[in-house]
Image: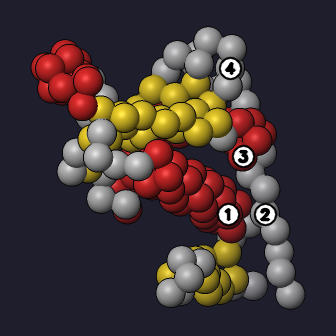
Amino acid sequence: MFIIITPILGWSWPALAPIIAAAAGLLGYSKLTGDSAKDWLQGKLSCELENLRSVEIAINEFLADVVAEELGREERLDFEKEDFVLTFRKDVRGKFFIEVTGPRTATRMELKARGEEFARNLIQQFAHHKIARELDRRGVQIVEEEVTEEGDIVLRTRRWA
């Protein structure tokens, strides 16, 4: 039996930020948002802009129902791994994007693959968090979590009557 779970409304920026950071952290990215992002963007990127390549991946179809209007327009989270910067953001029109910036030697396909990997991981983290909250609300304990080789998360639960 397969159960498809689609997260719905009810997310706020304070609830979203840790989930987004966890998804990026699982892929080896470290957080850049804040003063370190300004320093990094003004220093490294301004000097090496001509040597960078960037792709943007629209993910509105995946996240529109999940985060709805809870994430403010033009808010963003930036993460760095090796020579790549991954940005999760919402533009002024309310559209969600993952932008991946890397060295000019990286192909657009490689940048896109990194962004899509993050999008899949992010959606999985949202679903996991939502399920865990709902199970807790219903008095069900998660007793074991397993991540399969394919990346699926298997939860074993127990409910005391």
Q: Point out residue 161 in the picture as x, y percentages from the top left corner.
A: 75, 85
Placement of 66 over or under 38, stated as above or below: below
CA gap between label 4 and label 2 equals: 24 Å
Crowd class of label 4 (few under 14; some 14 to 19; many from 20; radius 10 Å)? some
Q: Residue at x 78, y 63 (%)?
A: 5
Quadrant position of residue 2: bottom right
Residue 144: image tag: none
Q: Which residue is mark 3?
A: 62
Q: Residue at x 58, y 39 (%)?
A: 57
Q: Which residue is mark 4?
A: 94
Crowd class of label 2 (few under 14; some 14 to 19; many from 20; radius 10 Å)? few
- Indicate left or right for 141 with 55 as reference: right
Q: Residue furthest right?
A: 1
Mark 1–mark 2 contact, CB under 8 Å? yes
Mark 2–mark 3 contact, CB under 8 Å? no
Mark 4–mark 2 contact, CB under 8 Å? no
User: Is residue 41 visible to the viewer in this orientation of the structure?
Assistant: yes
- Indicate left or right for 109 with 73 as reference: left
Q: Amino acid at mark 1?
A: Ile
Secondary structure of the residue carrying tag 3 is helix
CA gap between label 2 and label 3 equals: 12 Å
Q: Which residue is mark 1?
A: 131
